[in-house]
Amino acid sequence: MRYPVLLSVARCLWARPAVAPARRHLSCRSPPLEELFSRGGPLRSFLERQAASESQLQVRGPELVAAAKRLSEKEQELQETEHLLHDENEDLRKLAENEIISCQKEIAQLKHQIILLLVPAEETDENDLILEVTAGVGGQEAMLFTSEMFDMYQQYAAFKRWHFETLEYFPSEIGGLRHASASIGGSEAYRHLKFEGGVHRVQRVPRTEKQGRIHTSTMTVAILPQPTEINLVINSKELRIDTKRASGAGGQHVNTTDSAVRIVHLPTGVVSECQQERSQLKNKEMAMKKLRAKLYSMYLEEETNKRYHARKIQVGSKGRSEKIRTYNFPQNRVTDHRINKSLHDLETFMQGEYLLDELVQSLKDYADYESLIEIISKKL
Amino acid sequence: MERWGGMLRVLLSVPGWRGGTGGWAFSSWRHHLPPAGLSATELVNKWTAVFEKEGIPEARESSEYIVAHVLGAKTFQSLRPALWRQPLTPAQLQCIRELSGRRLQRMPVQYVLGEWDFQGLSLKMAPPVFIPRPETEELVEWVLEEVAPGPCVAEAQGGPLILEVGCGSGAISLSLLSRLPQSRAVAVDKGAAAVCLTRENAQRLRLQDRIHIVPLDVTSEGSWAHLLPWGPLDLIVSNPPYVFRQDMEQLAPEIRSYEDPAALDGGEKGMDIIERILALAPRLLKDSGSIFLEVDPRHPELVGGWLQSRPDLSLQLVAVRRDFCGRPRFLHVRRSGAPDGCPVDVQPGPPPARAPG
């Protein structure tokens, strides 16, 4: 626990119910972010200092200062309007109610804008990504769970209207999955999925268990951002492409059907294979996609590790060994250990729709929150 | 009880069993039994062993493709786990048995399945029409690379007009058309089976409106005249027969006994059809039009020498590209300007205005 204080603050914030009835619809954003804006809180004083400081010292320049100014104005306006709620004139009260609603809407938007201005977008947020799932501890049961997880992400991609293409799929004998990878693309795909990387743990009575005992098994998810052409340039001379046609005359002289392709990146020794398709060219394209993602994540690793050193939500290989989530079937609950958030109704969760989306959103918000804390404390 | 059923099931599903009496038994077993019969993996292993014993090349691959195909997948890799554990129906087992029987006769897997993939397309395959090789996918990639940024092509109405000589299953023309939505193609082949198969594949891919398929033998005298109304062309693409005659005997039984030798045999030096295409090209191509050919690794030098001996054609070998195994495999030949000594009757005076569309 690197930051016990931060953690306990977060816990207490998560547990806190929505603040006041009149402000309820503001709680659509997550509690910690909302709390940061409380009067006299660290973010407030940060924004005030920003407004006071010379323009070159300002973190996000005049845009942030303007938004902060507008926020205080609107809050002032809200406060003043709230007095009118107790007015004798009913028409005036009605008017005030409407005014308050629009005021609150604008305040929420301004807060959102301030967060966006403060939290730096990651270079890779808009990129496509490679999803890798691998069965961990627990034999066949772990493989069965891995298969369910892969399906969940496939359905989540459909739910988000992303493009999903299976690159490799290694099933186990009884219908489980040893390892698989897929290419996922679409609006902010990486931004949403980057927090899924890590060890996922399942607790339940396996289908294969005769005595009715609860087992604990694991599987690992890795999320690798897909580099664009500009992000990563690979010299073709550094690649060795292996196919089964390497010996003999080739061309019209032979008719082989093994279309598997294996690409080795010679400087790093990173290997990528594909035999998903009957077309050798397609297999090569897919293997190349995977290789690029692997190399890119290696390249990003150092930077990422530096940047997220202090964070609880880890992205990249450092996070891959971290146990991030438990799927407890007997209790019908899924718990994310990083933000200590539990959701119920596992069956719905595993359908990869709004419940998973809710958790993903919470993680994103929490990461934004951590990022904000970092920025604020740096500037103290 | 369950165990006995399982064992019986295994016994009943071995090849050679021609069942007909066990209808009731099968339906009731299916309800009560776990999938203890032969799984897809076990079937693959079984047929791999059979193929290996009979000396069939690519025993495991063949077996995997056949089982996957019968289960509705393209590759064994891409089979869904549900299909992995589902017991195969007697009809599926029978189908696998039949297809494997053909493979035992050394029929190429692509003919056994009746289809194969080329670029992103699934194409119907039928003997004796030549089966496209993976190298040719790279030829298509190269053509696409060269065509994409070309300003001269963009100016042409709706993309390049392409001629393919020896279209076979239609793989080259159809993959080009599917990637170049503005383009049109003329595909010729002297084999009636090839013409039919290209037509069928074009219809399956809904590309029939942009391809004109002509039965035509480019070696017969004056045949090119039939193509004149289509010209002038932007591109000629071909994977012509280029196997040296002396090599024909050494081809694997899959090729020798099933594929049309006319699609492979390129004459003594494998140059017969290549020379023919190059000789015809200047009459059909527009100025600075291109020819892309797949050839034998010995051909780039032979073609370069031959073109030097025929300056009247005004053709230049502008690039040679290697295939994924590093062999010089593809040629880009370009027509350079108006040929001086070209037959005068082809394009008298200025080139005729192109018919729209």
Image: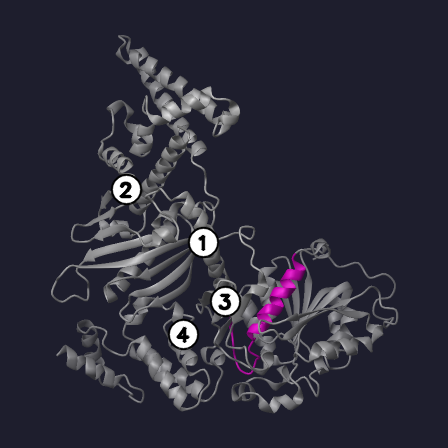
**What is the spatial separation of the Cα atoms under label 2 and label 3, in whole angstroms?**
39 Å
Residue B69 is marked as: 4
* Real-space Cα separation, disc 4 to disc 2, in angstroms: 47 Å
The mark that comes first in sequence, 2 or 3, is: 3
| First of labels 3, 1 by sequence position | 3
In the image, residue A305 sits, relative to residue A288, either above or below, namely: above
Q: Are marks 3 and 4 on the same chain?
A: no
Residues under labels 3 and 1: Cα distance? 16 Å
Q: What's the chain of the residue with tag 4?
A: B
Dot 1 amino acid type: Ser
Residue B175 quadrant: bottom right
* Circle 3 crowding by C-alpha within 10 Å: few under 14, some 14–19, many from 20: some
Outermost residue, top direction? Answer: A88
Q: Residues within 10 Å of mark 4 (few under 14, many from 20)?
A: some
Q: How many marks?
A: 4
Q: Residue at x 34, y 19 (%)?
A: A100
**Is label 4 or label 2 in front?**
2
Residue at left 57%, top 62%?
B178
For image coordinates 29% across by 12% down, the residue present is: A83
The reply to whether the C-beta atoms of the residues labelled 3 and 1 are less than 8 Å apart is no
Pointer 2 with pointer 1, Cβ within 8 A: no
Location of the N terminus of chain A (image quadrant): top left
Callout 2: 10 Å neighbours few (<14), some, many (20+)? Answer: many
The answer to whether residue B102 is above or below residue B73 is below
In front here: A186 or A10? A10
Q: How is the image coloured?
A: one colour
Image position, residue A55 (x, y; %): 52, 24
